[in-house]
Image: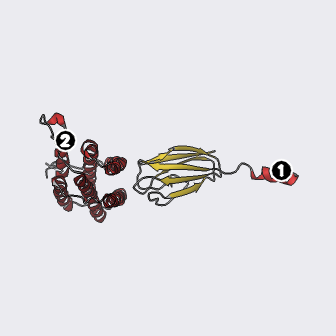
Amino acid sequence: MSRPMPPLLVALSLMLAASLPAQNPAPAAAPDLSDPEVAHVAVTANSIDIDAGKFAQTRTKNPAVHQFAATMITDHSAVNAQAAALAKKLGVTPADNAVSQSLMTGAAQAHQDLESLKGAAFDRAYIAREVAYHQAVLDALDKLLIPTTENADLKKLLQDVRPAIAAHLEHAKRIQAELGAPAKTAQ
Amino acid sequence: MTFWLWLLLAIGPAPTSHTVEIRGMEFHPAELTVAVGDTVVWINRDLVPHTATGAGKTKWDTGQLAQGDSGRYVARVAGNVSYVCAFHPTMRGKLLVR
């Protein structure tokens, strides 16, 4: 079994690569996301991690992994509730877009990869994905979502969410270290 | 007169209440010195729920604190008390009870 880069990470990396001027001499290289689209990306990214956490809870037998999954469900649900309240307040309808769609495609692929795994192999794969996912989301927040958002309330929400994403990343890395390396690396 | 003086001495210094703010996935201040009998109040300013949960021998827990909620702990015994957020193990704090 090969270990390709998770599609979700690819999607976010592409998004980031496109947003970095150094990567592309052409002007206006950044994906032109409107605020309703940024809101949609944020809600989609949270929902994906809630679903991954729910699935992990049905699969894992490791208490630390189970607790991590519970925290992901609780925290990302809290953020989405706040995002929904903000959208309502602003009268904004989150708008589906290519970035959200590639996130969903990546999530479906990741779910399929996890579906076949059990026990320690599942725990390692789930946590590895959570590390990659939160790193990608953190990078997207810093380099794309926060800088391109124009509405002050939406920008503040994204800024308020950032420390939670960073803490989730550290939490996942700790569990990854505890779980240790895979027993064997399949090619 | 003697009675009132006696009462004043018996009561001693009034217990103080201290506040620890939870914001940005951190306890502020992360380290706090309090006197025996003082109350520590944690207030959650974050979007996500937190707890303040005693680590080690002294088991105590504020329970889940949603945004805007607060929980308290009365420091009964002198010593250093480490605590964490039960949901986010990267969040750590310490009470120095004197």
Residue A54 percent across, percent down from the top left: 29, 63
Chain where mark 2 sits: A
Mark 2: amino acid:
Ser
Left or right relative to B65: residue A80? left
Q: Where, by quadrant of the figure, is residue B72 drawn? A: bottom right
Q: Give the residue at x 49% y 46%.
A: B93
Mark 1 on the same chain as mark 2: no
Q: Around disc 2, counting alpha carbons within 10 Å, would you say few (fewer than 14), some (14 to 19), or many (20 or more)?
A: many
Give the chain of mark 1.
B
Q: Nearer the viewer, mark 1 or mark 2?
A: 2
Q: Residue furthest front?
A: A91
CA neighbours of label 1 inside 10 A, class few (<14), some (14 to 19), many (20+):
few
Q: Residue at x 79, y 51 (%)?
A: B8
- Image coordinates of residue A105 in percent, x first then y, are 16, 57
Q: Identify the image quadrant of residue A52.
A: bottom left
**Does dot 2 land on a helix, a strand or a loop?**
helix
For badge 1, the amino acid type reads Leu
Q: Secondary structure at mark 1?
A: helix
Which residue was labeled with disc 2? Answer: A19
Residues A27 and B42: in front is A27
Residue A147 in picture, x, y percent from top left: 27, 43
Q: Is residue A163 visible?
A: yes
Q: What mark, if any, has residue A94 been given in the picture?
A: none
Q: Closest to the observer: A48 or A42?
A: A42
Say the numbered circle drawn on residue B5: 1
Q: Position of residue A150 (x, y in %)?
A: 28, 47
